[in-house]
Amino acid sequence: MKKTILLLMLAVVINSCSVEVLVDGCTDIYAENFNPNADSDDGSCWYTCTDPYAVNYNLVLNAYYCEYEADVVFYEDVAAALYFNNLGIDWLDVYVGNDYVGTLQATLGFTYVPVCFPTDPDAVHFTLAWENSLSSTFTWSVRDGFGTIHYSGTDLILANNCLPMELTFKKIQDYKESK
């Protein structure tokens, strides 16, 4: 009888205990691998950029973002080159924000618009990259070797495009007047 009561009590104790199993996984409903049974996020979520204009289109990544790029070409017209030649300035450095992107021969003026591809060795060519928008703005400046800014501006750029940036004598004058 004692054994029966003891067995009954043991059975009640075992049946009343439940073990909760926690499931780790991706808890973001927007992720490719969302796990509705997951109790805590373990950082394993995967996302895919679905914009065909993005450079990372259809790539599976561990964060959701789309990356975009566009090319920019800086060059001078002949009038600007003559202006810098008269000043004795031989080289101009091009900056995007505070980042140096290239150097122009200040006394070399273009009579045509250089294209992005193939690149012209006498122009400053670079690629801008940004995230999560088909367009972006960028701030730029052109400085001589002493740090004097002769041009600056903020321009809009569209993904997968080539933006020619002609540095003209008129832009020099406009910049001087704005200061």
Image (cartoon, rainbow, N blue to C red):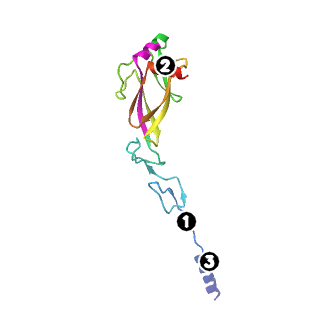
Question: Mark 2 — residue?
Answer: 173
Q: Position of residue 10 (x, y in %)?
A: 61, 79
Q: Nearer the viewer, residue 173 or 146?
A: 173
Cα distance between the residues tagged 3 and 1: 19 Å
- The mark lying in front, picked from 3 and 1, is 1
Q: Position of residue 109 (x, y in %)?
A: 40, 17
Residue at the limit of the structure toward the bottom, as seen here: 1
Q: Nearer the viewer, residue 116 or 48?
A: 116
Residue 71 shown in magenta: yes
The quadrant where residue 81 appears: top left
Q: Position of residue 35 (x, y in %)?
A: 48, 60
Q: Of marks 2 and 3, which one's residue comes earlier in the chain?
A: 3
Q: Position of residue 105 (x, y in %)?
A: 44, 17
Q: Residue sitting at 45 percent across and 34 percent down?
A: 156
Q: Let me know if residue 142 appears in the view.
A: no
Is disc 1 surrounded by few (<14), some (14 to 19) or many (20+) residues within 10 Å?
Answer: few
Is disc 3 surrounded by few (<14), some (14 to 19) or many (20+) residues within 10 Å?
Answer: few
Cα distance between the residues tagged 2 and 3: 90 Å
Q: Is residue 175 above or below residue 86?
A: below
What's the magenta region?
68-84
Q: Residue sitting at 45 percent across and 56 percent down?
A: 33
Q: Of marks 1 and 2, which one's residue comes earlier in the chain?
A: 1
Dot 3: element: helix
Is disc 2 surrounded by few (<14), some (14 to 19) or many (20+) residues within 10 Å?
Answer: few
- The mark lying in front, picked from 2 and 3, is 2
Q: Are marks 2 and 3 in contact (CB under 8 Å)?
A: no
Quadrant showing the C terminus: top right
Q: Is residue 113 above or below residue 50?
A: above
- What's under tag 3, amino acid-wise? Val
Question: Mark 1 — residue?
Answer: 21
Query: Of the numbered discs in the image, which one, if any, rests on residue 13?
Result: 3
